[in-house]
């Protein structure tokens, strides 16, 4: 048994995982006004009931840069008090079992390869598209995180007048069009022409990002995750149109692009950090 923890934008969720199935989930709300001491105490209190005899360790995914070896987390944007947190030493001292910390989208990629759409694929990229845009990279069955656990931060790459994140996440709707992705999704479901056009525009930008990923990593598969994937049917056609001029068409024929479908994949992926 292992424990997987997903540090999200508004809550922390932890699950007890046995043979690839989540046996129990605990959750606690987060506030950007909480102190470091309060959030660490909440984390410890939430994990404690899951630490049972036979649990091999705790894996944690955080939306930030991580010193993987030391388990130190830096500058978590939505928790300002988390500027430098020695998370691994703190939890290992509290529970006396091994702890591994990694980027949350890396955990998403691990989860998809082990339990989801990427099962059986040795090279894949998982792209998370929600409040931001990021990716986790699997090469030859190994997670590639980079020296500072910063590999895959594709949303930060310059694009047009800003970066990819402002065109391939919910920021495209809120910052560029003064609306929300949810509102436009609901309108698109009703056949609203303006909403459908907006998702088509979004798909064009996302297709350009996918091409960049293909040139960089040449994966067998791309798995999509995050809140915007529910609108995949609305932006898939223009995304694929953007791929038509990809320089290596034979590679494109072999590529699979699919939305992930497994619930709680971030928790499962975090638990997979414990081998």
Image (cartoon, grey):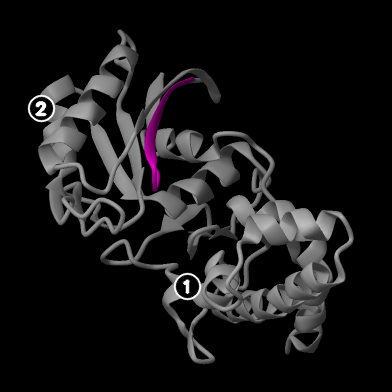
Q: Is residue 109 above or below residue 115?
A: below
Quarter of the figure with the N terminus: top left
Q: Quadrant of residue 250?
A: bottom right
Q: Is residue 164 above or below residue 82?
A: below
Secondary element type, mark 1? helix
Residue 151 seen in the figure: yes
Residue furthest to the top in view is: 53
Q: Which residue is mark 2?
A: 93
Q: Which residue is mark 1?
A: 155
Q: Is residue 144 above or below residue 1?
A: below
Residue 21 on the magenta span: no
Looking at the image, residue 3 sits to the left or right of residue 269; the answer is left
Quarter of the figure with the C terminus: top left
Q: Residue 28: where, in percent of width, then height? A: 35, 29
Looking at the image, residue 203 sits to the left or right of residue 250; the answer is left
Mark 1, residues whose alpha carbon is within 10 Å: few (<14), some, or many (≥20)? many
Looking at the image, residue 24 sits to the left or right of residue 232; the answer is left
Picture residue at 52% right of the left edge, 69% below the top:
171
Residue furthest to the right in view is: 191
Picture residue at 56% right of the left edge, 64% below the top:
170
Q: Nearer the viewer, residue 170 or 158?
A: 170
Q: Which residues are magenta?
A: 6-17
């Amino acid at each position: 048994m292992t424990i997987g923890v997903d540090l999200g934008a508004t809550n922390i969720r932890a699950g007890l995982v046995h043979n690839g199935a989540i046996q129990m989930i605990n959750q606690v709300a987060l506030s950007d006004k909480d102190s470091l001491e309060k959030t660490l105490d909440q984390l410890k209190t939430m994990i404690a009931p899951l630490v049972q005899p036979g649990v091999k360790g705790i894996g944690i995914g955080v939306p930030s840069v991580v010193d993987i070896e030391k388990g130190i987390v830096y500058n978590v944007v939505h928790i300002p008090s988390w500027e430098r947190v020695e998370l691994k030493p703190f939890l290992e001292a509290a529970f006396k079992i091994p702890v591994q910390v990694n980027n949350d989208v890396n955990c998403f990629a691990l989860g998809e390869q082990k339990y989801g759409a990427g099962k059986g694929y040795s090279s894949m990229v998982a792209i998370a598209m929600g409040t931001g845009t990021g990716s986790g990279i699997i090469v030859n069955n190994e997670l590639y995180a980079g020296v500072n656990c910063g590999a895959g931060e594709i949303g930060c790459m310059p694009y047009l007048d800003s970066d990819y994140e402002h065109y391939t996440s919910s920021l495209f709707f809120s910052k560029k069009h003064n609306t929300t992705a949810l509102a436009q999704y609901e309108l698109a479901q009703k056949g609203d022409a303006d909403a459908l056009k907006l998702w088509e525009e979004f798909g064009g930008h996302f297709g350009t990002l996918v091409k960049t990923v293909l040139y960089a990593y040449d994966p067998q598969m791309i798995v999509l995750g995050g809140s915007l994937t529910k609108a995949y049917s609305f932006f898939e056609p223009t995304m694929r149109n953007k791929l038509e001029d990809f320089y290596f068409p034979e590679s494109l024929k072999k590529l699979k692009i699919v939305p992930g479908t497994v619930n709680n994949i971030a928790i499962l992926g975090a638990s997979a950090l414990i081998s």
